Image (spheres, rainbow, N blue to C red):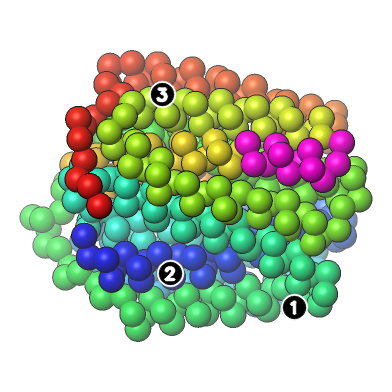
Amino acid sequence: MDKLAFATLSGTMFISMIGFGVVMPLLPIFGSTLGASSAELGMIAAATSFSNLLTLPFIGPLSDRYGRKRFMALGLFVLAITAFCFMWADSPTELIVLRGMQGLCFSLHLPVAQAFLGDLIPHGEEGKWMGMFNAVMFAGIGAGPLFGGALNDLFGMQFLFGASGVAMTLSFLAAVFLLKDRPSRTHAEVPRLNFRALVGDPVMRGAAALQVMTGLSMGVSMTFLPILANHNLALSTTLIGLLLASRSPITLLQTWSGRFADSHNRKVQATSGHILAITALMLFPAAAGFWGLFAANVVLGFGMVLTQPATSAYVVERGRAHGMGTAMAVSLGAMQFGSGVGPMTIGAITDRTDLATGFHSAAGIMVVGIAMYLWLMRTVPGRKQSHVTKI
């Protein structure tokens, strides 16, 4: 493993995820001040996911052939521009458009960075290195709301958008000047893209099912938990940021759960993680105050700690056969589908009922998702290796 490359990839991802995280959970509140309905709030959250899906099928295979760095740099550059543009948005429609633009850019950044890392990971250590990378990534997403809530209370939303743009710019500069790309691969070196084989691969189908559920739980919690905390419990944005950031220290446990996934049953690990996520979604509307929401969010964080390294390990293994960029694009596309359809569906349900029913509906959908995952993976053994290389 090239540890310098790992450190550079992790560092740029951490910076950009903080830039993304500082505004992501506060956008629903900002959208509400602009008159957005629950359905429009769901569309604001979903716009990134759906626009991401438009480009993911192309970016992954292209990065397999022409190199990773140029795609990452372009994505981060445009992400910085769109972050600054939020400073002038004054309607829900403009928020939806800008989030859509960000989705296009993230398809150039996140899956390509994961594929870059996947190229470097030794056999048998997929969970270990992807677990550490995911820990850094989710720590950035989680730390962002804490900074965002405090900055919003102190300086206002416009300052927050500017800070997000600065963070994205720093990540772009780090990628350009610190990251060394691998040589572009020839046509013969790139696995031939075969969608029938990709869709027919039971491991990829199972991993996609897991990612859809992960996207749904994250999308619903990030979109409607701030609304629940602000409107129903009158919490300040600083407390909301602290609430959402409570998952950050927990995500560091992925450095352990990733190694665990390399030597133990991944089916059991991934299923257990989603059962915890379902429990958290059921607990959110029953919470009576900040500490109740905090405890439920911690449960959700532990669920992600178990699920993500196991899922990533599946994808890296299959990426060696189908093309790492292609496999990562499929995996992220499944997550984006869940984080897009989830908030839109739950937003429509909430408009007709209430927030509690929306969270309970999301939990019910995840129960169906677990059953689908176990059925898709019924012929695949859960334990892939008998041992892994020690650190």
Secondary structure predominantly adopted by residues drawn in magenta: helix
Residue with the mark numbered 1: 159
Q: Is residue 225 magenta?
A: no
Q: Is mark 1 on a helix, strand or loop?
A: helix
Residue at which label 2 appears: 11
Could you say which is closer to the camera, residue 31 or residue 305? 305
Percent from the top left, x then y, of residue 112?
A: 35, 59
Q: Which numbered disc, 1 or 3, marks the residue closer to the eye?
A: 3
Above or below — where is 323 with respect to 383? below
What residue would you read off at disc 3? Answer: 268
| Amino acid under disc 3 | Val
User: Three-letter amino acid code at disc 1?
Assistant: Phe
Is 261 left or right of 13, judged from the image as shown? left
Does residue 317 lie above or below 41 as drawn? above
CB atoms of marks 2 and 3 within 8 Å: no
- The quarter of the displayed image where residue 38 is located: top right
User: Which image quadrant is residue 108 in?
Assistant: bottom left
Question: How busy is the neighbourhood of tag 1: few (under 14 within 10 Å), some, or many (20 plus)?
Answer: some
- Badge 2: how crowded within 10 Å, few (<14), some, or many (20+)? some
Q: Nearer the viewer, mark 2 or mark 1?
A: 2
